[in-house]
Image (cartoon, rainbow, N blue to C red):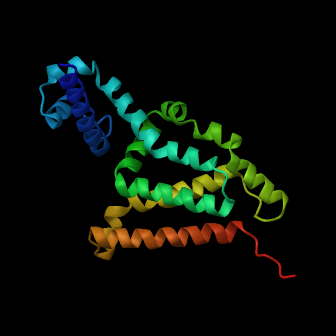
């Protein structure tokens, strides 16, 4: 019975994830989720007493998926240039695998910014990270242009996420299919990497 209960609960969560990512919190009803999970509303209410409670569970999972890997990367003992590249690669892969994730997070950012801030804590943790210290050290050594680490993270996240927010328009304007868009997005990410690093890192002076 326990296995059946866990299986049903996971089915509800997977269905809720799909519907919430597509419609957002306000556009989703418990009936939508129950229908997607193939159960009745009464059974769904047995496992999750409210849409809000279920959404919080899904939201926590999505934030972990999107930001936990970034928090791990900012504290890895690797070079600054390599770290910037890997942060962009991580964001890109997250968006490729979960194309609706950006819109889901953005909707919640406007609907309930306090919850996003409390759940993720990225802004609080960044100044304590190895990444932040690397930025400060590189500025002091004259290796990079003076800049706050929050600006670098914003450039990384915004440039990758906008690719996927604008995906329908890009595909329509350029006549791309799914494979064509993926190729375009991959090329664009490499351009953005070069652009950010070209801005940040000062040319090495010849001796």
Q: Residue furthest right?
A: 207
20 vs 183, nearest the viewer: 183
* x, y percent for residue 89: 50, 60
**Quick one: quadrant of the N terminus?**
top left
**Closer-to-camera residue (120/76):** 76
Q: Is residue 104 left or right of residue 199?
A: left
Horizontal side of 26 relative to 135 (left or right) equals: left
Going by the image, does 65 lie left or right of 158?
A: left
Residue in the picture at 64% in, 36% down: 124
In this picture, is 86 found above or below 27?
A: below
Residue pictured at 45% horizontal, 39% vertical: 63
Q: Is residue 148 above or below residue 21?
A: below
Answer whether residue 29 is visible to the viewer in this image. Answer: no
Quarter of the image holding residue 23? top left
Determine the residue positioned at 46% across, 39% down. Answer: 64
Residue 42: % across, % down: 15, 19
């Amino acid at each position: 019975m326990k296995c059946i209960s866990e299986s049903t609960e996971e089915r509800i969560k997977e269905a809720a994830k799909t519907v919430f990512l597509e419609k957002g919190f306000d556009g989703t009803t418990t009936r939508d989720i129950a229908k997607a999970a193939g159960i009745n509303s009464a059974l769904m209410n047995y496992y999750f007493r409210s849409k809000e409670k279920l959404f919080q569970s899904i939201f926590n999972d999505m934030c972990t998926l999107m930001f936990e890997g970034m928090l791990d990367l900012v504290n890895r003992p690797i070079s600054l240039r390599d770290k910037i590249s890997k942060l962009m690669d991580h964001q890109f892969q997250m968006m490729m695998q979960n194309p609706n994730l950006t819109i889901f997070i953005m909707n919640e950012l406007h609907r309930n910014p306090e919850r996003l801030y409390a759940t993720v804590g990225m802004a609080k943790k960044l100044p304590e990270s190895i990444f932040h210290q690397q930025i400060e050290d590189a500025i002091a050594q004259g290796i990079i242009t003076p800049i706050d680490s929050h600006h670098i993270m914003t450039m990384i996240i915004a440039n990758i996420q906008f690719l996927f927010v604008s995906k329908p328009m890009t595909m329509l304007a350029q006549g791309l299919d799914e494979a064509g868009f993926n190729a375009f997005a991959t090329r664009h990410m490499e351009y953005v990497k070069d652009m950010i690093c070209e801005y940040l890192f000062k040319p090495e002076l010849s001796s």
